[in-house]
Amino acid sequence: MKIIVCVKEVPDTAIALKIKGDSPEIETENIPWVINPYDEYAMEEALRLKEKFGGDITVITFGQKRAENILRNCIALGADRVLRINDESIKNRDGLVTSKILAKVIKDIGYDIILCGKESVDYGYAQTGQMIAEFLQISCVLAIKKLDVSPLNKEAICHREIEGGLEVVKCNLPAVFTAQKGLNTPRYASLSGIMKAKKTKIETLEPDAWGFKPKIRITNLSYPPKRQEGKIIKGTLPDTAEELVKNLKEARLI
Amino acid sequence: MDKFDCIIIGAGPAGVSAALTIARKGLTVTVFERGEYPGSKNLFGGVLYSTVLNKLIPEFYNEAPVERHITKRRYSILSKNSEMAVEFDFEDFNHPPFNNSFTVLRAKFDRWFAQKAEEAGAVIFTETVVDDFIYDNGKVAGVRARREGGDVYADVVICAEGANSLLTERAGLKKKPLPHQMITAVKEVVSLPKEVIEDRFNLSNNEGMALEFFGEAVKGMIGSGFIYTNKDSLSVGVGCPISVMKEKNMKPNDLLESFKSHPVVKKLLRGGKTEEISAKMIPELGYGNLPRLTADGLLIVGDAGGFVNPSLYREGTNMAMYSGMMAAETILEAKEKGDFSERGLQGYVKKLEDSFVMEDLERYGDVPEKLSEMPQLFKEYPEAILKLAKGYFTVSDLSKEDMHRQAWNRFKDKVSMWKFLLDMYKARKAVL
């Protein structure tokens, strides 16, 4: 079974991001980068599929040199091949460009199952998985919480959580699945895996001649509005209770 | 996995200094670090003394992510609403090696330092906790890391696990420290624009200042508050022995809040935004209570070894780096002789004894105990002195002589002159 996993590096969600001056970009210097958490579920599911059915796992990222770190993590976990498509020459990219480029590379490698995170926690467009499926003209199931694959019948059954219930979806392979939290519990890499990862040279592809153009661009970034300061009602009961009710009514909270 | 020449537990200044020194000699060395990256869990007040680092990486300040070099020092005593301070400004410290004192943010600095060790050939495993030593016939033969395939073997292990030294204690080399032997310190990094910091503290480009506050800064307890200037932030914190905090029923966070809201301190921090808050234990074990530093196949370095100068010099990282470097040199010698027994590693203790590390620890080893015998230094005296000064400076139509006499009489009501002078003499001897 040929399994493809698409991963992306994102700023560690534990830190507060800063906007770079007036630009529609964030400050990226000296902040910690991690693998997108949803991609970790995708990677873990790939490892489980490989353990069950055999085959090989190729992990792809579209990013700069720094992103080699997350690819190394994937080797440590058990990926057979990792590939970085260099994005340093790409001035503007959107979900469309990313998906087109990924689809092109995936097509050349060959695939039975493609796993992505359901979205990245940085910009959160949640587009890449489905667009890859579209460009490859294959099935696509989003935000899955369980995956049962039958290679013999070339089909898969997935669980999806929907508002107030559970949906069971059947599809043909090959297919793209995007991972929702709860799909599995990602493992930790073994020491020998990490050792191997440290010694691996990362394969890089240069996409500059492909000429894909973005269709959307970010024009502005701003911080969320500051939370209003709390109000302390001073005095004694029952006046304070009355004042509180009055305030809550004014704020249309009751 | 293959066997290594050396395993190091902890990628702090001590562990990385050892790793760098050993890797440079071509031995295989691996470091286990529990944090996400080296530095992510490492903390100190904010000033790095760098005599040892400058030997390990000459002129490191040209490439290391240091914040500012310290040219100004200010020591002050606070009472509730007043301050008495003495300030030093040394232009000469503006030239390399910048008096070997720099403010540093550890998350950045330690990461850079660890990278130097990796470039030299050390292998660093992050997010990997070591649970125990592995013994072979009573000799430490490796470590058990909390990961699949986590049993790793080596000729010798360096334990650089830091102040919370559970492995060192479990190996029977160290007693569990007592509350008065541990300082608990909390600090915030408060961001301010670079220009504001330079104006407010009267600094030129890259110059830095270290400010220490006593007395009411920590509610009259033994201990101090501090502000150190980084490039575009301040490290602001307080530290006191755990025993004293417990006795006064004081929480570290509340103590920091009270320090920050002191009128004098508040003015220095105004407009700043708290970016992060962190806490650390500092071992001030005392010279007589240092752990056993060697065992068969094992060396203890850095905070785990209790290498902290508790005096006004506040030196920890520099000693840690020195201990790491000496541990490494000892291992290189032991490798030649093929003897990693405790006897074969004894050179380590000798090297430390012949250096500033043990000399200073011996000289200042009993500072915490001596100071704890004189709580008046931190509470009664600051208040009395500031009241005296206020008496001198308060403008009135009394004759100056009457003013002075009244001020002195009030002072002597509170403080016995002889005891005061004796205490001052003892205090100076203890801390400088």
Image (cartoon, coloured by chain):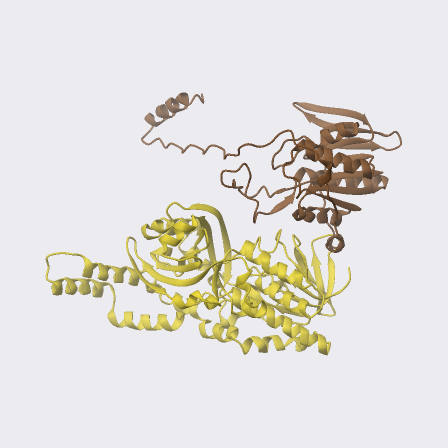
Chain colours: A brown, B yellow
State the quadrant of the N terminus of chain B. Answer: bottom right
Is residue B257 visible to us here? yes
The quarter of the displayed image where residue A37 is located: top right
- Eyeballing the image, is B192 above or below B240? above
In the image, B372 versus B283, the foreground residue is B283
Left or right of B142? Residue B168 is left
State the quadrant of the C terminus of chain B. Answer: bottom left
Left or right of B354? Residue A69 is right
Left or right of A72? Residue B403 is left
In the image, B272 versus B166, the foreground residue is B272
- Residue B397 percent coordinates (x, y): 10, 57
- Residue B155 percent coordinates (x, y): 72, 69
In the image, B165 versus A186, the foreground residue is A186
Residue appearing at x 71%, y 33% in the figure: A99
Label total for image: 0
- Residue B194 percent coordinates (x, y): 43, 51
- Eyeballing the image, is A212 above or below B302? above
- Eyeballing the image, is B171 above or below B67? below
The quarter of the displayed image where residue B220 is located: bottom left
Residue appearing at x 66%, y 61% in the figure: B119
- Residue A89 percent coordinates (x, y): 66, 42
Is residue A183 visible to us here? no
